[in-house]
Amino acid sequence: MKGENYMHLEFPSRSTNEAFARSAVASFAAQLDPTLDELGDIKTAVSEAVTNCIVHAYPEELGPIILKARILPEHVLDITVKDRGCGIADVEQARKPMFTTGGEERSGMGITIMESFMTEFRIHSTVNKGTTVHMKRKILPRGGSK
Amino acid sequence: MKLTSFVQDRQLTLMLRGEIDHHSAREIMGAISAKVDEYLPLRCILDFEEVRFMDSSGIAVVLHTLRRMNSLQGKLLLQNIPPQPYKVLRTAGIEKLTIMKEECTQ
C-alpha cells in the first residue's frame, strides 16, 4: 500500500460507544487485509482503552474521548485513544495485572491485554489533565495482491 | 443479553450470546446470578459458542460466576470458546482457576 491514511473520531464517554469504537477501528483496519485473529486483537485492545476512559477517566461525568487511527508504512496500524479526564496518579501500579480500582465489575486486565495484544504500547497520563494511550500493531502481509 | 439456560441433574448450562464488554457485563452478571440463585446448581457450564466478541469485562463475568459457584461449593466449567474470547481468558490465566474445555473453531 502506498501513502498514508488516517481517521479521527470524537464521542462522549457513554458505554454504548465501546462497540462503536472497536467496530470503527476494525472497519478502518480492513484496508490492511488483517486476519480474523489480528482483527480480534485490535478490537480487544481498542475496547480496553475506551472502557478505561469511560470507567476511570470520567467516573462521575461524561467527557470526550478522542480516537485516532493511522496507517503507517510497512503495514502498521497506529491507534491513539485520548481523554481529558482525571488522569492516573501511579501509572506503574495501573499497569500491574489484576490491579484495578474499578471494583468487582472490572478484572484489572485491560492494560495487560493491550500490552500483549499489540506490537507497541505506551501510556502517558497527567493528573487532572488526562490520559493518552498509544498503540501500534503490525499487520502481517498475506500472499496475493497488496 | 438474552440468556438461554437449561438444567439437568443440578447441572446448569448457560448459553452466552453476542458481545461481552463493559457496557453489557453488568446485565450479564445479573442474569447469571439470577439463574444460579434460582437453581443452586452443583455444576455450572458457561457456553461461549455464540459469543462474537469479549474483552476483559468477560474475565470479570467469569470470576464473578466462579465466586458464586465456590460459595455453593459447586464447579464452574467453560466450553465451546471461540478463538478471540479464548485468547482473552488465557491472558488472564483463567485456565488455572476453572476448567476450560475445548476451543471451538469459528
Image (cartoon, coloured by chain):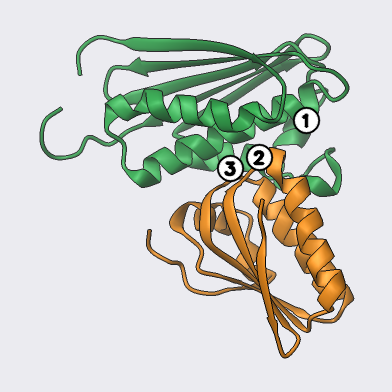
Label 1 crowd (10 A; few <14 / some 14-19 / many >=20): some
Q: Nearer the viewer, residue A93 or A50?
A: A50
Chain letter of disc 2 in the image: A
Q: Amino acid at mark 2?
A: Gly
| SS assignment at label 1 | helix
| Mark 2 vs mark 1, CA separation in Å | 11 Å
Whole-percent x and y of residue A2? 20, 13
The reply to whether the C-beta atoms of the residues labelled 3 and 2 are less than 8 Å apart is yes
Q: Which chain is in orange here?
A: B
Against A56, residue A43 (above or below) is below
Left or right of residue A121: residue B59: right
Q: Give the residue pinned by disc 2.
A: A110
Q: Amino acid at mark 3?
A: Ile
Q: Nearer the viewer, mark 2 or mark 1?
A: 1
Whole-percent x and y of residue A100? 80, 41
Q: Amino acid at mark 1?
A: Val
Whole-percent x and y of residue A135? 51, 26
The numbered mark at residue A31 is: none
Label 2 crowd (10 A; few <14 / some 14-19 / many >=20): many
Q: Which chain is in green here?
A: A
